[in-house]
Image (cartoon, coloured by chain):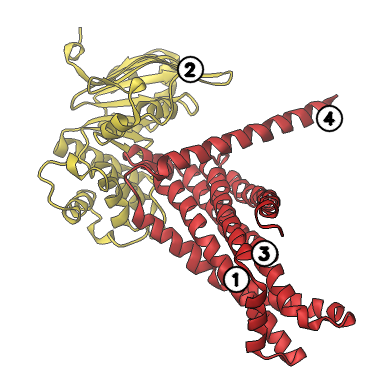
Amino acid sequence: MNGTNALLTRTKSFFAEIGDMTLFAGRFFREVFSPPFEFKELLRQCYNMGNRSLLLVGVTGFILGLVFTLQSRPTLMQFGAESWMPSMVSLSIVREIGPVIIALICAGRIGSGIGAELGSMRVTEQIDAMEVSGTNPFKYLVVTRIAATTLMLPLLIIMGDAIALLGSAIIENLKGDVSYLLYFNQVFDALKFGDIIPATIKSVFFGFAIGLVGCYKGYYCSKGTVGVGEASNSAVVYISMLLFVIDFIAVFVTDIFFEI
Amino acid sequence: MNSKANIKPVLELKNLHKSFGDNHVLKGFNLKLIEGENLVIMGKSGSGKSVMVKCLVGLIQPDSGSITIKDQDITTMGQKELDLLRTEIGFLFQGSALYDSMTVRENLEFPLRRHKDKIENFQGTEVLVKEALENVGLAHAIDLMPAELSGGMQRRVAMARALILKPKIIMYDEPTTGLDPITAKEIIQLMRNIQKKYNTSSLIITHDVDCARVISNRMILLVDGINYAEGTFGELSNSEDPQVQAFFKN
């Protein structure tokens, strides 16, 4: 009986949190289009999130391309289909693996960072101090961060995909004697707008989810320094789950409009 | 009857109630702050002092009661009007609450971003920041980060930030907590200087008896969410009520 009650309470609080997060998202849309606009802070956040994630995304993308090609080669060779390698790698990376892996990396790098930063600002009363000084902390801290992740994540994913394809091309060049020109010709032959556009739209939603959950967890953080750790940790867990849900919906919708 | 009773208060709380679940923190608290006065609120930890002061600046919504600042009831006010009114109030947080990703200069510039028009004869951000830092004796720390400052220096920078919009009312939440006795005395002296220079009305939340003795014109003892006793420092310190005496022993 106790177990059932505990499960019921947890389910209730989970849905209550989803509801709160929806209201939080609603407040974002209300405030993002109303002046005053915090352009300077938005640019600073874009720089922090974009520029400072370049190395991590670049290295992850490069290794992703290398490993994916190395692991796929033997199987394709068994069927005499090595020539399909550029098409297969490019479609897999651009449509699915690149956006999902890079978004997960950014959930850890950016989402947890936002959760911890806003959480520590909350427990040290810095957010209250902003409010008391007559500045809207939601607009200054939350709107700028969500907008920055929404803008930056598609760019990071495009860059990560490009570097992953370069990694794949290097392996193909070394192991299969395929020239870079031939490799990239085959890549661009295989890719269509129907592959790139849905993936880019999907990555905009990924960016929004990372910013939204990170900000929500940090903004409503409580319980002192323990709460900051919890905010950061639960931000990553929620974002990771949400990314897969968004991915599923995106694939479903893409299938209807672009016939995968 | 006290002559101040007829003077119009700059800030008034009437019958303030606030609960968190089953915990009734404020149970009908009343307060009047007269222009130019230093009013000290004393109470034990957990007696509701910080909750009361947060209700005063609109950070916490009270369950019932009215809060009037400069003839405006803030409990019924819209966000824009409240933000505008907040520029008339300086607030010093217990832990200083400096923005740790900004320099001292940026911390002081922050409240000015949207409210430059509130200052008469606005001479420019740089002049105001320097003036505020000179008031607290920290002009040399203008480009330092909060992490590079000692606890006492952080408290002074927080005071400078609270003063930068030239507010008429200043609220201090535990201004000397966590400071050594010498730095605490410096902060108290600074509070007196500021009051003299700008003729501000101050509401000071503290359980530091020395601070109360030096700075208060009048005191209220907050016990179990109500005004337990009220008077000057001398009147309260000579009271024979055991609950009142408990604050002044040691």
Residue hosting label 2: B224
A126 or A38, which is in the foreground? A38
Q: Which mark is residue A3?
A: 4
**The chain coloured yellow in the image:** B
Few, some or many C-alpha atoms within 10 Å of disc 3 (few <14, some 14-19, many ≥20)? Answer: many
x, y percentage for residue B36? 18, 27
Residue type beneath disc 4 = Gly
Q: Nearer the viewer, mark 3 or mark 4?
A: 3
Colour red belongs to chain: A
User: Is the residue marked by circle 1 packed among few (<14), some (14-19), or many (20+) residues within 10 Å?
Assistant: many
Which mark lies nearer to you, 4 or 1? 1
The percent coordinates of residue A92 (x first, y second) are: 71, 68
Discs 2 and 4 share one subunit: no
Residue bearing mark 1 = A160
Report how far apart the C-alphas of labels 2 and 3 lie in the structure.
63 Å
Quarter in which the C terminus of chain A is drawn: bottom right
- Label tally: 4
Q: Which of marks 1 and 3 is in front?
A: 3
Q: Which residue is drawn at 35% across and 20% down?
A: B76
Separation of disc 2 and disc 1 at Cα? 60 Å
Quarter of the image where one finds residue B188: top left
Q: Which mark is residue A8?
A: none
Sequence-wise, the earlier of marks 1 and 3 is 3
Marks 4,1: beta carbons within 8 A: no
Q: Which amino acid type corresponds to the residue marked 3 in the rendered image?
A: Arg
Q: How crowded is mark 4: few (under 14 residues within 10 Å), some or many (20 or more)?
A: few
Q: Which of A252 and A126 is in front in this view?
A: A252
> Residue A95 at what x, y percent from top left?
67, 64
Q: Mark 4 lies on which chain?
A: A
Q: Mark 2 lies on which chain?
A: B
Q: Are marks 2 and 3 on the same chain?
A: no
